[in-house]
Image (spheres, rainbow, N blue to C red):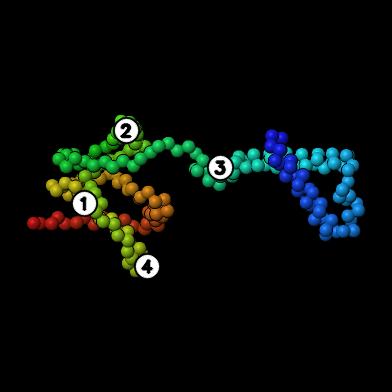
């Protein structure tokens, strides 16, 4: 036993417990011999204190391991190592003649220098970049249905959405985990119909 504190704590606990027991059951006081000097009895009490002190020391030492084991079972994602990551914003150049640019997975991205140090990241999935931007998002209701409207427009004046061969769109749902998970649940589980309404070009 490395820490004598546990032993002294157990000796003190046994003495206080004996006093409380005598006060509650005074008829049994003669059998407890409060002021006994019997060395055999003292050795038994000390041995018991050493045993219980050792158990308590082991329990206290294993609390971090026990907590980690419980978290591994209940919330395994919280104990997994998480590397540094960032959210990257890609935009097509305004004078780009391409309607889409494919950015493959594991594309290297280098950060701006911070104290002369640059960090290198890699993308984790394929991205198809279009000259599009979301300028409005609205949630409403029509009768018993809820509508989720995303207004998208092109970033280049000479293009319309019809001119772009859109294969798929990646939507970033935000960095607030509750809101992002709720939106993802709605989109994956509760969407009944998706309607595309092209906006007529405005003639000036």
- Residue 138: x and y, percent? 30, 60
> Alpha-carbon neighbours of circle 3 within 10 Å: few (<14), some, or many (≥20)?
some
3 left or right of 155 in image: right
> Alpha-carbon neighbours of circle 4 within 10 Å: few (<14), some, or many (≥20)?
few
Q: Considering only order in the chain, which callout, 1 or 3, is on the residue closer to the N terminus?
A: 3
Find numbered disc 3 in the image and state the secondary structure of the residue it sits on: helix
Residue nearest the observer in this picture, 141 or 61: 61
Q: Residue at x 74, y 40 (%)?
A: 7
**C-alpha separation, residue under disc 2 versus residue under disc 4:** 56 Å
Of circles 3 and 4, the one toward us is: 3
User: Does 127 appear above or below 136?
Assistant: above
> Alpha-carbon neighbours of circle 2 within 10 Å: few (<14), some, or many (≥20)?
few
Q: Residue at x 8, y 56 (%)?
A: 204
Residue nearest the observer in this picture, 38 or 28: 38
Q: Which residue is mark 2?
A: 115
Find numbered disc 1 in the image and state the secondary structure of the residue it sits on: strand
């Amino acid at each position: 036993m490395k820490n004598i504190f546990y032993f002294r704590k157990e000796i003190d606990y046994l003495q206080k417990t004996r006093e409380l027991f005598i006060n509650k059951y005074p008829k049994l006081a003669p059998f407890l011999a409060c002021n006994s000097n019997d060395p055999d009895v003292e050795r038994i009490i000390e041995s018991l204190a050493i045993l219980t002190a050792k158990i308590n020391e082991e329990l206290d030492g294993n609390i971090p391991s026990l907590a980690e084991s419980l978290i591994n079972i209940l919330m395994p994602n919280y104990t997994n190592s998480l590397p540094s990551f960032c959210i990257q914003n890609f935009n097509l150049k305004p004078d780009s003649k391409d309607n889409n640019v494919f950015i493959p997975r594991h594309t290297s991205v280098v950060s701006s220098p911070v104290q002369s140090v640059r960090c290198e990241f890699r993308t984790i999935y394929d991205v198809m970049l279009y000259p599009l931007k979301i300028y409005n998002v609205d949630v409403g209701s029509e009768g018993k249905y809820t509508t989720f409207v995303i207004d998208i427009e092109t970033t280049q004046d000479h293009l319309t959405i019809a001119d772009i061969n859109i294969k798929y769109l990646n939507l970033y749902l935000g960095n607030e985990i509750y809101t992002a998970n709720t939106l993802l649940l709605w989109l994956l589980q509760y969407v009944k119909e998706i309607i595309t309404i092209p906006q007529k070009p405005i003639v000036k």
